[in-house]
Amino acid sequence: MTALRNEKSSRGDIVAAAVERVVPGDGIADSLGRLVDGTEVSRATFLKGGGALILGFSFAGSLFKAGKAEAANGSTLAPPATAVDSWVTINPDNTATILIGKVELGQGSPTGLLMIAAEELDLGMDQIRQQRIETGVTPDQGFTAGSTSISGGGPQVRQAAAEARLALLTLASANLGVPVSQLTVDKGVVSGGGKSVTYGALVGGQLINATFTGKAPLKPISQYKLIGTDQQRLDIPAKVTGEYTYLHNIRVPGMLHGRIVRPQGQGEYGKPIVPLSIDASSIKQFPGVQIVRKGNFVGVVAKDEWVAIQAASTLTVKWQESPTLSGVGNLGKSLRAGKTTDTVAFSKGNIQAGRANAAKTVTRTYVAPFQTHGMIGPSAAIVDYQPNGLTTVYSHTQLPYALRDRVAKILGRTSAQVKLIRVEGSGCYGHSAYDDCALAAALMSQAVNAPVRVQFMRADEHGWDNYGPAQLTDISASIDANGKITAFDYASTQPGWMSTETTEEQNGSAVPLATGKPDLDNSGAQYALPNRRVLGRSLPNINGGVPKVIWMRAPGAQQTLFGTEQMIDELAHAAGLDPIAFRKLNISNYRWVGALDAVAKASGWTPRVANSVSQSGTIRKGRGIAIGGFSNTYAAVVADIELNMKTGKIVAQHMFAAQDAGLAISPSLIAQQMEGCLVQGTSRALLEQVVFTKNRVTSLDWVSYPILRFKDSPDVTTVVINNKAEKSSGSGEPTTAPVPAAIANAVFDATGVRMTEYPMTPARVRAALAAA
């Protein structure tokens, strides 16, 4: 049972009337174009009402607020960033609607942003609502990526809320006849001189009409009431009860269903995806199906979704073959064989001098795999193309304004002619294929002149994802007789990252862009190293013998730390020191020391040299430590594992983590992210690898690309270090970064064998044990 509540809109009352009552069903009552009495609303009538799809969102017991359902001039361009009304709306009931551009991808950061706004406005969390994200209505805060929602978006929201508070106090001062300096605010009630007035009474329902002054005081940390407290994510209750409406549930009047048609799995990135022939007669048993081809893009559209699915799988297309992938049989060898562009990204001191008087030098190579984002719910999108009006896009993108621009480009429209409404879909960390799905829906909608909903099949999602890049890491490091690191020479080889979508490439409307650089933060920067060099060996991702790659949770950090933190552990062993004691000996930054101390205490760490406890029998136990981070955050992870010497299976029994992300907006929200990081990091460390032949990717489902199951999921313990002396930094990704290294170090502790490639599958573990 889902309540489709009345959401008043300036664009007309037709749709609002249609969803005024509680309707049984899947949350959209078959179609939002069907009235509760069963009457159909024609597409023309629907569009006359503004074309607005009024979503049955539930957010902390209420809707995403409709507040400013459309910009005053109807523009889909971003509202001015320096206007208070672009960020804050005060409602007559003395609540506030906050407009943000950072989206919900599963990390809960919108709740944190609303906490920041409530704190500066002196409101309670029960008085805060979020405006649904829509181009032309909500501000453009760029990508929701890189764990920057709080660290980057937070200061913007804080400043806007502070400016709103100053404007409201100025109004209250005139209303009450009391100087601003003598006013106090509690839960939106302004008091002074024995009198009071609410925010709602001052401007409720009207514009604040103020611009940023740059003089609005920010509340000092000592006066915080909300920030630093544990708050429940505002989206969770409705998700648990099934009341929350996801993108995948939405239906619009006159909507058709589309499916893309591509080869089963991508080939080498940069090679054209060319349909040599299409046999339309192969789907003649499905009347009414339309084949859409534009450039090399191919799709099918049908009135019935199941018919579209069958037609897409049945349509006979002969594709141009390009057997030019490197294959994944010996990934490290193929990465080393590629032609690279080499750049010294960092250099300090003299590596040769650091080696000259070393007591011990260790050299080793490590390999990290290609991995998929693997959204549990596949990408979906709806596009309603209007040749003479406003085209509407419904997408779960992480970059609303940028995707709006890309849809406009692929349709040959201007950005002002396209509106994007952001609706949450399946959670994802990193750039999966959801934008590609929206672009495909746009082409199909334009071709058939009707709204088209596209949802990827599992093989589409897995086979045409933007994968996390593989990496080959070579490290040579030295220590002196006292255990101090004297030289650290690091080199990484990986493909560059791309920034185009497959539909754009097929349509011929995009030029692939390749970028990439080594991870400087985790390639030894954690330590006080007198002699350090970082060399980046960049493989071409275009026609480089590899599939398409882009950022994935803690981009590059896992790959880098798998080598760096194993090398640190190996140096500790060579020095005859406990792994934590060795790290602290070579660290000068107090935040790394704090994370190490916190995780040691949480895990009950007993100092000893790794692999110094004799074990026998089939089951061996091990404990490993690794530090590293992402987005200016400091994380330390301890892994307790069991390893079966016969089968080679590793079971992560317990994962411990401590994280310093500066000022914690809500420690419990950070802890939730850390828990997810530990579990997903374990899955990536032990199981996940994109497999491909010379022709194409073959990891197309959860069998060929396994992920961690509940029965093998570790227990987790998290410690949030609320470092109020430092600015808030990222929390959605950092703790996952050291996980593979911590597990690999635990394997060494249990067996004395180094795992130099992950995922650490049973077969790979057995091979390493046999080789040792």
Image (cartoon, helix red, strand yellow):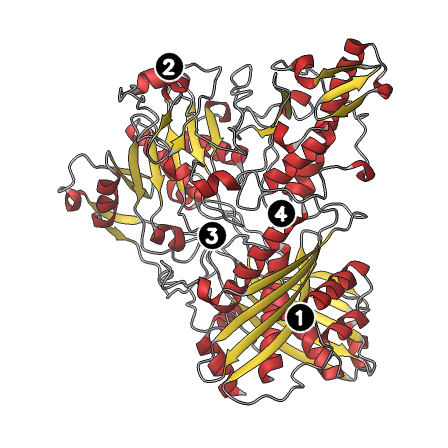
Q: Can residue 708 be seen in this view?
A: no
Give the CA separation, mark 2 to mark 1. Answer: 62 Å
Position of the N terminus, as image quadrant, is: top left
Disc 1 marks which amino acid?
A: Ile
Disc 2 marks which amino acid?
A: Lys
Task: Report the mark closest to the observer, 1 or 3.
Answer: 1
Q: Which of marks 1 and 4 is nearer the N terminus?
A: 1
Give the CA separation, mark 1 to mark 3. Answer: 30 Å
Q: Position of residue 240 (x, y in %)?
A: 46, 43
Quarter residue 533 falls in: bottom right
Tag 1–tag 4 contact (CB < 8 Å): no
Q: Position of residue 39 (x, y in %)?
A: 26, 19
Task: Report the mark closest to the observer, 1 or 4.
Answer: 4
Q: Position of residue 685 (x, y in %)?
A: 53, 67
Task: Report the mark closest to the observer, 3 or 2.
Answer: 2
Disc 3 target residue: 466
Q: Position of residue 675 (x, y in %)?
A: 58, 57
Disc 1 target residue: 625
Q: Earlier in the sequence, mark 3 or mark 2?
A: 2
Q: Which of marks 1 and 3 is nearer the N terminus?
A: 3
Taking the spot 70% from the left edge, 23% from the top edge, the residue there is 188
Q: Earlier in the sequence, mark 4 or mark 3?
A: 3
Task: Report the mark closest to the observer, 4 or 3.
Answer: 4
Task: Report the mark closest to the observer, 4 or 2.
Answer: 4
Disc 2 target residue: 48
Give the CA separation, mark 4 to mark 2. Answer: 42 Å
Quarter residue 103 falls in: top right
Disc 4 target residue: 669
- As helix, strand or loop, the secondary structure at mark 4 comes to helix
Q: How crowded is mark 4: few (under 14 residues within 10 Å), some or many (20 or more)?
A: many
- As helix, strand or loop, the secondary structure at mark 1 comes to strand
Q: How crowded is mark 1: few (under 14 residues within 10 Å), some or many (20 or more)?
A: many
